[in-house]
Image (cartoon, coloured by chain):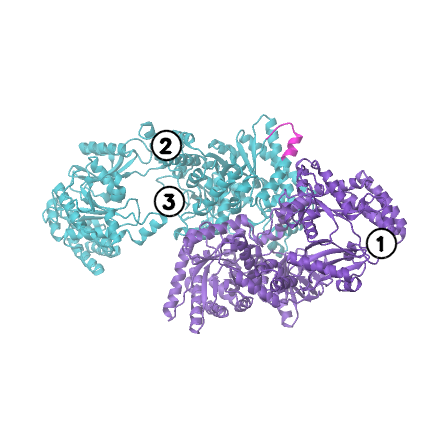
Chain colours: A purple, B cyan
Amino acid sequence: MADRGHDPRQPRWVLEFSEGDRTQRDLLGGKGANLAEMTRLGLPVPPGFIVTTEACRSFHAYGGEVPPGMWEQVDAALANLEKDVGRTFGDPYDPLLVSVRSGAPVSMPGMMDTVLNLGLTDSTLRGLARSTGDSRFAYDSYRRLIQMFGSVVLGVDEEAYEDELTAARERAGVRTDAELDVDALRTLIDRFQQVTEHHAGQRLPQDPRQQLRQAAEAVFNSWNLPRAQHYRKLHGVSEDLCTAVNVQAMVFGNFGEDSATGVAFTRDPATGEPHAYGDWLPQAQGEDVVAGIRATRDLSELADEMPSVDRELKAALELLERHERDLCDVEFTIERGRLFILQTRRGKRSAQAAVRIAVDLVNEGVISEREALERVDPNQFEQLLHPQFAPHAQYEVLTRGLNASPGAAVGRAALTADEAARRAEEGEDVILVRPETSPDDIHGMSASKGILTSRGGLVSHAAVVARGMGIPAICGAEEVVVDRSAGTLTIAGEVIEEGELLSIDGTSGAVVRGEVELSEPELGGAADQLLEWADQHRVLQVIANADLAEDAASARAWGAEGIGLCRTEHMFMGERLPLVQRAILAADAEAERRALDELAPYQRGDFVELLEAMDGLPVTIRLLDPPLHEFLPDVTDLRVAEAKGELSDDDRTLLEAAERWEEANPMLGVRGCRLGLLRPPLYRMQVRAITEAAVERRKAGGDPRPKIMLPLIATAAELEQLRGEVAEEMAAVLAEQDVEVTIPIGTMIETPRAALAAQSVGAHADFFSFGTNDLTQLTFGFSRDDVEGRMMSTYLEQGLLPVNPFAEIDAEGVGRLIEIAVVEGRRGNAQLEISICGEHGGDPASIARSHEWGLNAVSCSPPRVPVARLAAARAAVSAEVRNPDT
Amino acid sequence: MADRGHDPRQPRWVLEFSEGDRTQRDLLGGKGANLAEMTRLGLPVPPGFIVTTEACRSFHAYGGEVPPGMWEQVDAALANLEKDVGRTFGDPYDPLLVSVRSGAPVSMPGMMDTVLNLGLTDSTLRGLARSTGDSRFAYDSYRRLIQMFGSVVLGVDEEAYEDELTAARERAGVRTDAELDVDALRTLIDRFQQVTEHHAGQRLPQDPRQQLRQAAEAVFNSWNLPRAQHYRKLHGVSEDLCTAVNVQAMVFGNFGEDSATGVAFTRDPATGEPHAYGDWLPQAQGEDVVAGIRATRDLSELADEMPSVDRELKAALELLERHERDLCDVEFTIERGRLFILQTRRGKRSAQAAVRIAVDLVNEGVISEREALERVDPNQFEQLLHPQFAPHAQYEVLTRGLNASPGAAVGRAALTADEAARRAEEGEDVILVRPETSPDDIHGMSASKGILTSRGGLVSHAAVVARGMGIPAICGAEEVVVDRSAGTLTIAGEVIEEGELLSIDGTSGAVVRGEVELSEPELGGAADQLLEWADQHRVLQVIANADLAEDAASARAWGAEGIGLCRTEHMFMGERLPLVQRAILAADAEAERRALDELAPYQRGDFVELLEAMDGLPVTIRLLDPPLHEFLPDVTDLRVAEAKGELSDDDRTLLEAAERWEEANPMLGVRGCRLGLLRPPLYRMQVRAITEAAVERRKAGGDPRPKIMLPLIATAAELEQLRGEVAEEMAAVLAEQDVEVTIPIGTMIETPRAALAAQSVGAHADFFSFGTNDLTQLTFGFSRDDVEGRMMSTYLEQGLLPVNPFAEIDAEGVGRLIEIAVVEGRRGNAQLEISICGEHGGDPASIARSHEWGLNAVSCSPPRVPVARLAAARAAVSAEVRNPDT
């Protein structure tokens, strides 16, 4: 590219569009690099130039002084621009107007907005009116410049201009700004100048070059606006990147019949269908297309109106998509029959379109399978798996809670699990609304279309169970107050009767009164194709957390390759609870054994069904984990009943037991393997039931593959002792039978100590599974129940945490423990199989880390399995890109 | 040493006493090496030989076969022994008798017991009777041999012999075995032989060599007895050490007037006074001295009876003490006027004696100061600091609990804190007996002589507070049941009225009904001397955990060099509680500020007193740590009152607040710095109070050195933000004043995450203090409150934990986190000061580790300070021994 008059002895602070390309993002910013690239491709981009990020860096390094020679280079570039356009900056007869925009190397909110129409002054204004033959347009452009320059460059409160606009409309007796005539605008311009002077101590400069210089320095200064600094800190963007300044000749789509403006996509961004798609408006400026004041026209109609422009635009779109190898979103303007491309970027798209486009581009030979996998965000992909609020549905959000389980649902409010079950029985769709849920509510939860709680976080009981069942849920919606006695709930002050219709969107956390139209999920051919590629490329196995045979079947249908976590405590509820209580209350070993003997057939039955549903695939069964008092009634409730004289003898026995087993901090109490060590018969019963179930399945011709997992291990000695007992019990069962079943024995790693002692623990384990919920709780000292609702939002807002560590694994603390445990666990046992089965097992960022750590598998809730398959594949593909030899 | 007939082509499986010395512990075992050493010194040791540990190792390596040539070497050594003694093994006229004892390189219970009198058979029995002229002695020796050989070597149940003995006594109509005559013994010998044959399938071999061989193999086999294996596993003793077998000629102290047996110490083991001390009995065998059947005689009387033997013994004692450079405990026998030394070892001694002897030995030029420091166990040293049950007091232990705070106390039982305070007011000594204690009980605790709780572990509220106050306490005594309504307590089934006398020993955990005589502590000149040396040699600073000025004064008197932890929450109780509650309940920021403004003067006053008491020394003040609901009433109590219709309006407000702030796991909830971040005015008030107190003290001419410590940090961002707020508030106060005060700002490291992120956290800290109580809780996932009482004893008994990790730092998990945090914290800030302020700060083993980790200080409860000074010195001294160049 020829140097157009640059002095080679000076550093280049300014590059013209024709001098750069898209590889120069760091120097030119994202927007500038794109404009340069389009210019290089020969597309009709209005000419312009870029003041580089280097200039901005120097500006900040020298206390807000632009580098020597910069303004001279700007003037030289401006002179070239005048030549290219054939107009002169400040020409009172036919002035060149320019726009000034910021543009950092990474897209970043909080930077300076655009200033359009720079170059207009009291004197050039008349020239513009004359040359365009449209006085109203010229005056309106001028008042916009004063307004934008005042607010954006001089920092005048936008409110001040809006007040004047309102007054002007009132004076003119019109409803919209567009109805203000030239006289009204002329008055308004005076008022705007006064407002500007009053608030900023200066008016819009009447020297166009001064306008340009002030605007450029304002862009530089906007790099250090608090909002931008905060964003950079939160997202780890380097302070050194700095921003470029884009100066571009203005073009106008409102010069009569043969002018227009519009937005075009290279493919349909809603469906992904492979044809150009967009909106345009004749005789309009850019913002009119999105303002919704005039009805836009479909892009397909452009061919009839301006066939040659349409051909040129289609060619440009095709060129851009081939060049970008992806869906492009283009802003264009037609000025007097001439097409200009103002901007291009990768097009935002719906989940459905993302998948379709990625797969089509592979089939068209444009991108590779690997690239297709990288093109679809797993979190977005998940939208395809659940109903959503229909895209065009209108509704008012009453309140928001935590997006605890994705998908949308509509149903009648039920305030108790029993009521939810009853209504569902009668064929109603139900939304269960509770302060929080407990294992007692399972029957009501599974009968509901959606769950809404006022307390609890992303790993509360309600959230975990809902995700496991694939039911939409919102948790911790603090503005929801349930009044069971009145049979009502109050949401943000509105009183709602039980039985009224509610709509909830578990993907966004929105709660709506009444019915919102839903769109049903479609996992079409393209999504299946993408998942097939994902399975070919991923290294991590994807297994599921499932407790019941029906969950296991659903997991298998979603593509799970086994069960990574079956929580047996869910088998201790309902009709079995009295037996469990008898075992807890047992006065002696004999009574305990009798109660456990009665429980055993239930357990065995559960396991037989589970092993059948997952025949041929591993089923990891965790022995009982929660503290015993979870199986006993609430102490406070019983004490209140006692105070009222309403306590039966049985209740009194339960109260004594509940008080005996009450714990100050049950999460840190006698649970998990500690219970197994203190009350060995319980675990032995479970081991016997698992082994007998495996034998039964084997005899029935099946291929049962149970694994036994011991929870909450802190020391190698615990695992060694329990492993011995488990093996002894298994051997006892198998000795009675004539079949061989091998059942690996492993442990959860969920205490920091187990991770730190992974080498000695690993020596006694066939497998590890990271219980990242507990591990996160203990590493931070955060109780999910207590901290998430009360503290997490404040912490995230204040940047005290970059992400919710219960949603995405905390790399610095928890991740470091995992790394230690992986490396040292395999030192203890080179064959150790390692997986992750906390809530993080379904989180794409955590799955990417799991791949890097060299885990064997991730285990997540069944409906999350496809997301995990995709995320695992992306992790493998991007690792390949980073380490091409491995 | 001449080889007495050993074949040089064979390995040496057997060494005679005269061939070894004390450096050969690994080969000869501890007992054998001592016997060899004494022989080498020319002391009159009955001759004998040792089958080496190497032989035992070979025995086990080859499946229980003695190594080839071993028996031949035993026979050769036996021949030499016969020559030395002048008797022959198996000689029917004057038989040589020997003892066989096990002896491993480390002292270890659970190994095989001694077998005496080997060599007696039906035929040599008569020779012994003749040669000694004492048939009863000979028969009694024989029945003992059969009994010992049967039970120890052949594994016959001891019970079987005892039954026969009982029957024999009944037949003879006598009360003790000693009264059985020769005929009775002859019959008994027959029955013993039958019993042996019946149970073991063989009789005592009539070939003396066969007896010896079987006994030696039994010693080898006893290495693998379950009890021995368990001990080795628990104490980390290598399986490869194996045991030696000691074979020694028998000598008898019951051969008439000029025979005797006794035990002698080189100094008084109770007082440490520098003169020989012991007991002896004429005409007696070893076990008679300790059996207590006959009154023993004081060693000083031996000089009158047998002056030359006495001179020889004194010379031997002197020689041994000089040689061992420590108090020795010697077993001796006088056979027909001839002195034999049977065994020597380092003498057990009282705490007082340990200190006196160590200091005297330095003054006598025998050992160095360093050695003196290593001679006194800090845990034993602590006994000198507290009253104890008097050494000779007689009492019956009703029950035992955890030894939560050392020292003994006697007082009248009080079942509530108020009652304890009332009785103390009236001049009574009180023992406060509670299920557990809470901050509400402080006034009653400080008024009591001792504290006894039925629940809670070594770091329960009661334990921590009692140790801090230096009050004896026993916690978690599960057999203690308090019935407040009846005004009684039940201990192990005995009903005791409030006001009855109880005695407790917090050092041992013993609870006694009635009054036990106490011995008062004396920290005499020797102890002061030892502590002076300790201060010269230690590297670690010793500081104290103290919340109040009086605790600080006491800590200073014990030698503390500052305060490592002042818990400000104790300043929020009592008359201030309503103000705290008002701040919590405040409807808006203004009301909160008003309540805090009223609290501020109290806080400032506390800090002024504290800084005055520790003038010139650092005072580390931790900002508020516990969850807010600790300052609110119990929810269940209020709900019960509500059910009874007894809830006032104020109570209802408190109930609502208590329910709002109730947490499922308060230990993991909104507390510590989280509270400071959610409710900034609270911490700001505290910071202001501290800074103003420092200013006041400075103006009064003092040298205040406060440090501000932020609790429960998990991320660097938390510390960064809080540090900013603290610094801002300090600067605001100082700007109003005309003095300069520098207040370092640091953090507790008590979450695993803070340790793992120590580098980034350290960059914002002037100091770290490990809160090892919380750190241990989180690393293990153990709640002190819940786990210690219910689980810890089982865990310790079953070897699932080697020590209680709340008493001694767990090296594998918690210790590793500390190591990481020390190294990486100093990477973040090279000047970082690091200390430890959990309960472990006063534990000698943990102090030794703290020295190794390179910490700057340990902080413990004030009465523990002297122990910590000694422990720190020992850590430094033993580190010097290991690393002589540093």
Q: Name the residue under label 1.
A: A178
Q: Is residue B739 magenta?
A: yes
Question: What is the C-alpha distance between the residues marked 3 and 2?
Answer: 39 Å
Furthest residue toward left: B93
What is the x, y in percent for residue B274? 30, 30
Residue type, label 3: Tyr
Q: Mark 1 lies on which chain?
A: A
Furthest residue toward front: A2
Q: The C terminus of chain B is located in which quarter? A: top left
Mark 2 and mark 3 in contact (Cβ < 8 Å)? no
Residue type, label 2: Arg
What is the x, y in percent for residue B526? 37, 30
Element at label 3: loop
Q: Give the range drawn in magenta.
A: B730-741
Residue type, label 1: Ala
Q: Does the magenta stretch include residue B415?
A: no
Quadrant hosting residue A444: bottom right
Q: Which chain carries label 2?
A: B
Element at label 2: helix
Answer yes or no: is residue B431 visible: no
Residue A285, relative to residue B607: is it above or below? below
Q: Name the residue under label 3.
A: B395
Q: Which chain carries label 3?
A: B
Q: Tell me if mark 1 has few (under 14), some (14-19) or many (20+) residues whose alpha carbon lies within 10 angstroms of its own.
A: few
Q: Tell me if mark 2 has few (under 14), some (14-19) or many (20+) residues whose alpha carbon lies within 10 angstroms of its own.
A: many
Element at label 1: helix
Horizontal arrangement in the rendering, residue B111 relative to residue B628 (left or right): left
Residue A709: mark: none
Observer-nearest of A713 and B391: A713
**Mark toward the start of the polypeptide (3 vs 2):** 2
Q: Name the residue under label 2.
A: B370
Horizontal arrangement in the rendering, residue B19 relative to residue B696 (left or right): left
